[in-house]
Structure formats: structure tokens, C-alpha cells
Image (spheres, rainbow, N blue to C red):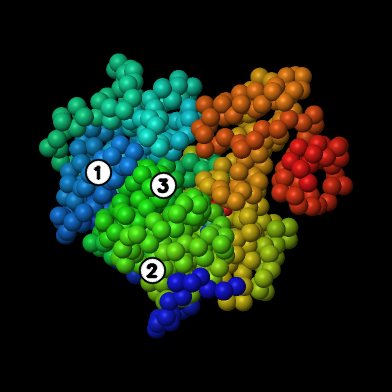
């Protein structure tokens, strides 16, 4: 395992080992120090209360506010500096807000919410494209103590409806449309359908009209943002001082059931965790520019488009568009123009760029860029080498989850400069007691290069999920009960650790798949496909893909198999099923292929053998099949996929 070219920094004094040791052995003192990176209205009495494991409370008794730390304190200290830089290559528009201007916009948005009766603890669902108003809405919620729940704009009505029902928002903020590759993607009809499907009905829908797509307004429910903003133009809305453990937001993520989980985050712990990560891991400084290519609908968007960079006093660059339009140099052009110092993206995006002319990378002055961070899916060696060599800047992998909110594994170059290793996201980050455990015995694997489940001993550090929204039992049963006789958090990832403490992630232990860095539950996709009137049964698995990391493959048993008997018929059934998934869940969840079989591989007790299907699709040995009910089932799949 060699170092990534360009990422090996000279060894400087500093000692990550003792920094880490202190974080896990003296967490109270360690986190007290980190807490000084943010402003508190009232000091906390205790850094961590772990009196009711696995529920951890951070900075108990302290009051603070995420919006104050992200916006107001910088408006006060550096008001004229850039805070939000918005560039859309889709609609060919740009807007730049200083911290002072951002505060004004957030106050207006907060006033609109308050006028609709939204207050502390009320939920606001945000279903929006990548536009500044989405950031205003998130920060406005944080300002008044309302709980935001951002739903990725690429999700469709059924996904949205289940999230509306779970979050029961008082108000929804949305827009007429997004845009992808110059094509308008209307949102409003999906939102209206979702509200119709949902049992819970929001009192109001605040619509940002970009003038991209005409939409119907529901009288008495739908409000126009521009008119409301005008009405509250001079509003002054102070930050609500919230106890550190108040809920800041929920963010839905896929699991092994069809019902998405609302990852619930606090206020103070999250603010401290992000401030610390900006200093120790991302090494971003106030007055500089941060560019994350993610979307506000994902956790990276929450932590490292909105809150993290702003808390650090950096300008955040919010980009609406593709990495290849108008050409594959657009990101690097933005880096040069805005003197980006820290950039964050995903391996899939880099693989997309790898297919383009490499001259684009040499065209711009990237000397401001200190590092490119990549996360969300495994970073393969060829991709890491290519981007490191092409950029000539350090590439830093980081491994984490929606649940943790910030990296579990990475390199804390802000504490001690350390080399990265190919294929490894790095070492355990401060505060995380990372263990590798034997899946069936729970025994800790302490030797080098042993494969186990990546687990974290409680309490989870600040910034991690408090619980699953509205379902403490699900939090405990899902995350803390999978290892025998041990109350330990499971990441549901396999990993190994080498002799230097660097971890390697080897894929999921559950049925969650990762398509282009987006986490999808195979069960959700199966439920959508099974709702097609001619589908009797279906299995969805994730299959390795050179570009997207993984793609979803579906194998369905039809009620009336004769409809797929001819090649033409099968193609038509496949198209119909894909359309259904598009309409219900969104194109992001659409399987790469839907193939038809007469029987699915199952155990004699009826459990789907998803891992065996996946192995066959990837031309691997499916392993022990003594429990399979009908061995011809796998043969059918083998003959469809080849091998
Ligand atoms: P999400 O919650 O959508 O961010 O997905 C989290 C999952 O993505 C993890 O549990 C891993 O399976 C995978 N993942 C995230 N970052 C990395 C990384 N740097 N290397 C390998 N896998 C990753």
C-alpha cells in the first residue's frame, strides 16, 4: 500500500496519536476545549452525559444557536466578506452574499416562517434545488429553533410522501423547478402529489418561483416567496438560544426496511463537531472559500455546504450544475476564480471527469487549493492516482455516514501532517472509539489485517445522531443491537485495519447499496417495483459498476409471465417498471436493469439470497448454497447476466 502522489506531506511536529488518545480517554476535557471554537450564550455544565446509554447528551445545559455561529457572529466580525457564493451553470446566474447580506436574507425567511406560526420544535420540510433560498430556509429554521428536514430534490412523490408523514411538517418550502443539463425539472406537481398521498397535511407551502416552470397554486395553502419576502423586508428576528440538545434537524436515510430513518441531530454538539472538523481535518480558515460539489439533500450538503464552512467563517460555494457543463473545466475554473482553498467531492464525480480531456485540469491556476477531499463511497486506487497526478494537490479520502455527520476515518492534517495511503480513508478520527468486531461472536479483532464489522463504542462523539426521529427503539434496535452481547454502534460496513492503524472499507454488511455516492435501500426499490400490477416478487441487489461504484439490478417474477415472453415484451415490461420507480422514488433509485425470472433464489425458510444473486451478477462464487430451495433459480440469473 503506497502513498497517493501529491498527498505525502512533509512530517511536521505535532502528535495525532496523543491528540486522539486524549479525546477518548479524557473526553470531558478534550471536548470542553473544542467547544471553545463556537460561541455559547450560556456555558454548559457538563460536556457529556452518558447516563442512559446509548443516548449521549453533549454540552448539557449550554445554550447556543447554529445560525448565530454560522452567520451572525461573522456578520458582526467580518460582515463584508463573502459568505455564500452561488453559481448556476444551469440558469447561467450568479449571486454573492456577504455575511451581513446573508443574515438579512435569513432574518426575512425566519420572519416569513414565524408569520405562519412556525416556532421552536416545529418541523419545516425543504424540497428544493440548489438555490440560495434553500440555504436561507435551513439557516432560518436553525435561527428560530424550528427543525428542518431537507429532502433531496431528485426524490419523487412516494419518497417525499413517506418523509412528509414521518416529519409531519407545519410548512414546506419548495420551488417551481430545478434544472439538469439545461432541462427544466419541475418540482411542484411532485410535491402536490406527495401531499395528496401523505396522511399529514402541511398548513402552508412556501413557493420560490424561479420562473422556470408554470405551476398551480393551492388557494389558502401556497404562499409566494417573493411577495412574502417583500412584506418582511425589514424584519429583525433574533436567534433563539437553544439548549445544546435541542433538535436542529432530521435527515432521512435508507436502511434495510422500506421505511427511511430520520437521522436526528442536536444543536451544540453538531456545531462543535463541525467547527473542530473544519480546523483539524479540512484545515479551512475564516476568509477563505470552501467548495463542496454535493447537494443540500445529502448529509455532506448539510455539514459541508452549509454549516461547517460558515461556522468556520469561510465563504461557501454553492453550485447548481453538472461537472461537465459548459465543459469539464468548470469546477477548476471556479476554484481559480474564487480562490477555493478546500474542496469536497465524491469518487464518482472524479470518475466522470476522468473520461474527459485531461487538458481541462491543466488550464486553470489551482494554487489556492490545499486539498481535495473525497467521500461517500470507496475511493478506488486508479481514480485516486489519476486525480492526484492530474491536480497535483493532496487528495484526502474520508469515511463517514449520514448518521455521524462528520468523518469517522480520515487524516487530521490540522493536528499532524500524515501521508494518505491508497484505498484507505485513513485512521480513526478523534472522539471515535472505532473497533473491528467479529460479526457473530462480537469478539474484538485487535490484530492487523483482520476483517470485521466497523463498530464504534459509545458514547458517539458530538455531532452524531441523537436518535432516530420519533423512534428511540428503532435507534437502539437498528444500530446498537447487531453485535452479540455488546452495546456498540454498528456502521454496517466491513473493514480491516493495517499495522499502522489505517482502515480499509470493504463494503456493507447489510442490504444498503451505494450508487454514485448515494445511499439507497434495496428494500425501498423492491417495494416500488412490487407495486407494479404485474409483479409478483422482486429482488434488488447492488452490483459493482466501473463508473458509479454500484448500480441496482432487479430480478422480478411476473404474475403473467407471457407478457415478457418475447424480447420486445420484456423490454416493455422493464420500461414500465423503471418508469414506476422514477415516478415513485425518483431517477436516482432507478435500477440499471430489470430482468425476469420464474423463481427467485431463496432459502428454504423463504429468505431472499441477495448476496448470492449479487455474487452471480459480479461473476463471483455465490458461496454456500446448502440452504437454497431451488438451485435452478441462480442458474436462471447466471444465464441472464452471463458467466
Ligand atoms: P451515507 O450515509 O449516504 O453518507 O452513506 C454512508 C456509507 O457510504 C458508509 O456506511 C459506507 O458504506 C459508504 N462510504 C462513505 N464514505 C466512504 C469512504 N470514504 N470509503 C468507503 N465507503 C464510504
CA gap, disc 2 and disc 1? 31 Å
Task: From the viewer's side, name the closer residue of 134 and 454.
Answer: 134
* Residue in the image at 52% along x and 65% along y: 385
Closest to the camera, between mark 2 and mark 1, is 1
The percent position of residue 283, horizontal first and vertical second, equals 35, 67
Task: From the viewer's side, name the closer residue of 526 and 294.
Answer: 294
Asked if residue 251 is positioned above or below residue 460 in the image, the reply reads above
Rate crowding at label 3 as few (under 14), some (14 to 19) or many (20 or more) other CA atoms within 10 Å. some
Query: Nearer the N terminus, badge 3 or badge 2?
Result: 2
**Residue designated by label 3:** 324
Rate crowding at label 2 as few (under 14), some (14 to 19) or many (20 or more) other CA atoms within 10 Å. some
Query: Nearer the N terminus, badge 2 or badge 1?
Result: 1
The percent position of residue 484, horizontal first and vertical second, equals 69, 57
Q: Quick check: is the Cβ at mark 1 less than 8 Å away from ligand 1? A: no
Asked if residue 117 is positioned above or below residue 365 in the image, the reply reads above
* Residue in the image at 41% along x and 68% along y: 392
**Residue designated by label 1:** 94
For residue 412, what is the image quadrant?
A: bottom left
Closest to the camera, between mark 3 and mark 2, is 3
**Residue designated by label 2:** 280
* Residue in the image at 23% along x and 44% along y: 95
* Residue in the image at 29% along x and 45% along y: 87
Q: Is residue 320 left or right of residue 466?
A: left
Quick one: quadrant of the N terminus? bottom right
For residue 227, what is the image quadrant?
A: top left
Rate crowding at label 1 as few (under 14), some (14 to 19) or many (20 or more) other CA atoms within 10 Å. few
Amino acid at each position: 500500500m503506497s502513498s497517493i502522489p501529491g498527498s505525502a506531506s512533509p512530517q511536521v511536529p505535532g502528535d495525532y496519536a496523543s491528540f486522539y488518545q486524549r479525546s477518548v480517554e479524557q473526553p470531558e476535557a478534550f471536548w470542553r476545549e473544542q467547544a471553545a471554537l463556537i460561541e455559547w450564550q450560556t456555558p454548559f455544565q457538563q460536556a457529556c452525559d452518558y447516563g442512559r446509554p446509548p443516548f449521549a447528551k453533549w454540552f448539557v445545559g449550554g445554550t447556543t444557536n447554529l445560525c448565530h455561529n454560522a452567520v451572525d457572529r461573522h456578520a458582526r466580525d467580518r460582515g463584508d466578506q463573502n459568505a455564500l457564493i452561488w453559481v448556476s451553470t444551469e440558469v447561467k446566474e450568479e449571486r454573492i452574499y456577504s455575511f451581513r447580506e446573508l443574515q438579512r436574507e435569513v432574518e426575512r425567511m425566519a420572519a416569513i416562517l414565524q408569520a405562519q406560526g412556525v416556532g421552536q420544535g416545529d418541523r419545516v420540510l425543504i424540497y428544493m434545488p440548489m438555490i440560495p433560498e434553500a440555504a436561507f430556509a435551513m439557516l432560518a429554521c436553525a435561527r428560530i429553533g424550528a427543525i428542518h428536514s431537507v429532502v433531496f430534490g431528485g426524490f419523487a412523490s412516494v419518497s417525499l410522501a413517506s418523509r412528509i408523514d414521518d416529519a409531519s411538517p407545519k410548512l414546506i418550502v419548495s420551488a417551481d423547478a430545478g434544472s439538469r443539463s439545461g432541462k427544466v425539472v419541475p418540482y411542484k406537481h411532485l410535491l402536490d402529489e406527495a401531499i395528496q398521498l401523505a396522511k399529514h397535511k402541511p398548513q402552508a407551502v412556501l413557493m420560490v418561483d424561479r420562473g422556470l416552470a408554470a405551476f398551480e397554486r393551492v388557494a389558502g395553502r401556497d404562499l409566494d416567496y417573493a411577495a412574502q419576502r417583500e412584506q418582511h423586508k425589514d424584519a429583525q428576528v433574533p436567534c433563539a438560544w437553544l439548549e445544546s440538545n435541542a433538535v436542529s434537524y432530521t435527515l432521512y436515510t435508507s436502511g434495510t426496511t422500506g421505511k427511511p430513518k430520520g437521522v436526528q441531530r442536536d444543536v451544540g454538539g453538531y456545531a462543535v463537531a463541525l467547527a473542530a472538523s473544519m480546523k483539524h481535518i479540512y484545515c479551512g480558515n475564516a476568509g477563505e472559500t470552501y467548495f463542496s460539489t454535493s447537494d443540500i439533500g445529502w448529509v455532506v450538503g448539510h455539514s459541508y455546504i452549509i454549516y461547517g464552512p460558515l461556522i468556520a467563517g469561510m465563504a461557501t460555494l454553492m453550485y447548481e450544475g453538472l461537472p461537465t457543463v459548459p465543459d469539464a473545466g468548470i469546477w477548476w475554473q471556479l476554484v481559480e476564480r474564487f480562490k477555493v482553498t478546500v474542496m469536497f467531492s465524491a469518487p464518482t464525480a472524479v470518475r466522470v471527469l476522468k473520461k474527459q480531456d485531461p487538458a481541462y485540469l491543466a488550464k486553470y491556476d489551482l494554487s489556492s487549493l490545499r486539498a481535495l477531499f473525497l467521500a461517500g463511497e470507496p475511493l478506488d486506487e486508479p481514480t485516486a492516482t489519476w486525480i492526484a497526478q492530474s491536480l497535483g494537490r493532496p487528495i484526502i479520502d474520508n469515511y463517514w455516514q449520514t448518521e455521524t455527520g462528520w468523518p469517522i476515518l480520515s487524516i487530521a492534517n490540522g493536528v499532524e501532517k500524515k501521508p494518505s495511503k491508497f484505498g484507505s480513508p485513513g485512521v480513526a478520527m478523534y472522539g471515535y472509539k472505532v473497533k473491528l468486531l467479529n460479526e457473530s461472536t462480537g469478539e474484538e479483532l485487535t490484530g492487523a489485517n483482520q476483517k470485521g464489522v466497523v463498530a464504534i463504542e459509545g458514547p458517539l462523539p458530538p455531532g452524531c445522531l441523537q436518535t432516530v426521529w420519533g423512534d428511540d427503539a428503532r435507534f437502539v434496535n437498528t444500530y446498537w443491537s447487531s453485535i452479540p452481547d455488546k452495546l456498540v454502534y454498528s456502521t454496517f460496513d466491513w473493514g480491516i485495519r493495517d499495522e499502522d492503524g489505517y482502515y480499509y472499507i470493504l463494503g456493507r454488511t447489510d442490504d444498503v447499496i451505494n450508487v454514485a455516492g448515494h445511499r439507497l435501500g434495496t428494500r425501498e426499490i423492491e417495494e416500488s417495483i412490487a407495486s407494479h400490477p404485474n409483479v409478483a416478487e422482486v429482488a434488488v441487489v447492488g452490483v459493482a459498476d466501473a463508473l458509479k461504484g454500484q448500480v441496482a439490478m432487479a430480478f422480478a417474477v411476473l404474475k403473467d409471465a407471457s407478457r415478457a415472453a418475447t424480447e420486445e415484451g420484456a423490454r416493455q415490461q422493464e420500461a414500465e417498471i423503471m418508469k414506476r420507480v422514477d415516478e415513485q422514488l425518483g431517477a436516482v433509485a432507478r435500477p440499471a436493469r430489470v430482468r425476469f425470472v420464474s423463481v427467485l433464489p431463496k432459502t428454504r425458510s423463504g429468505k431472499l439470497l441477495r448476496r448470492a444473486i449479487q455474487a452471480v451478477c459480479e461473476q463471483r462464487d455465490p458461496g454456500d448454497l446448502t440452504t437454497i430451495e431451488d438451485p435452478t433459480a441462480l442458474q436462471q440469473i447466471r444465464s441472464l447476466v452471463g458467466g
